[in-house]
Image: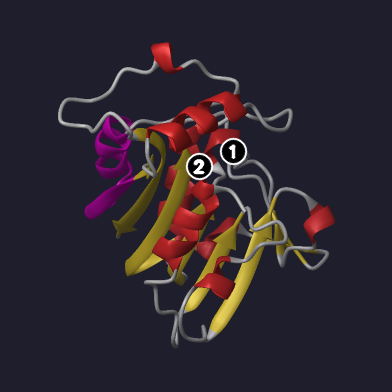
Amino acid sequence: MSKSREQINQFLSEINLDGKTVLDVGVQDNPAAKYCNGSARKYLTMDVDREWRPNFLYDLNDDKIDIGYLGNLVNQQHFKNRFDVVFCLEVLEHCWSPVQALENLFDFTKEGGTCYISTPFINPLHDKWDYLRYTPEWFEKVLPMVGFKEFTIKKRYATLGVLDLIKFYQAEGLRMSKIRLNKGQHKDQALIGLFIEAKK
């Protein structure tokens, strides 16, 4: 398991799903629930690829299609304000229109509910639909724009020492000389991703 995924799972371990209605978007075969605490009242999955056998087949960037549910079509209004918790982990980099995708995630989330989002920052291109990387500043601008009332952005760092960091960059095909550290950031740290908790 990658260091990045270990950090995401650590954040998930602090979430309690007891009695919640949950939608896991872009789940593939790795549901967030197995890393969280508690048992959801209802746990549904959504993915763009039917190969992963999600409960709902849907593309966050295509509002012109209805949402497929176990072979049947469900109108998008059926999803509005429905879920206490929405997970969207390592998905937004595959969305060509991320603002539209966030608007859909906001719509799926109940008033008072929480949307959890994770995105990579330093990561090689993966699969043919890998479009974007995001900064904390991008989320600070866009989350309020789509309607989220409050949010926290947790930075995921490679932090296990200079040698480990060099190995990480070498493994990813990057050069240390290309990395510009933020003010106050220790020399053995580099941003590798974000984990966001956004409240509606």
Residue interval drawn in magenta? 136-155
Residue 141 among those drawn in magenta: yes
Q: In this rendering, is residue 183 above or below 136?
A: above
Query: Tag 2: residue type?
Result: Ala
Tell me which corner region of the image, top left, top right, bottom left or bottom right, holds residue 32: bottom right
Location of residue 138 in the rendering, given as x and y in whole percent from the top left corner: 32, 31
Q: Nearer the viewer, residue 72 or 141?
A: 141
Residue at x 62% of width, y 66% of height: 31
Q: Nearer the viewer, residue 177 or 60?
A: 177
Q: Nearer the viewer, residue 33 or 44?
A: 33
- Lower sequence index among marks 2 and 1: 1
Q: Callout 2: 10 Å neighbours few (<14), some, many (20+)?
A: many
Tell me which corner region of the image, top left, top right, bottom left or bottom right, holds residue 197: bottom left
State if disc 1 and disc 2 touch (CB < 8 Å): yes
Relative to 26, 121 lies left or right = left
Element type at marker 2? helix
Q: Which residue is mark 1?
A: 61
Which dot marks residue 101?
2
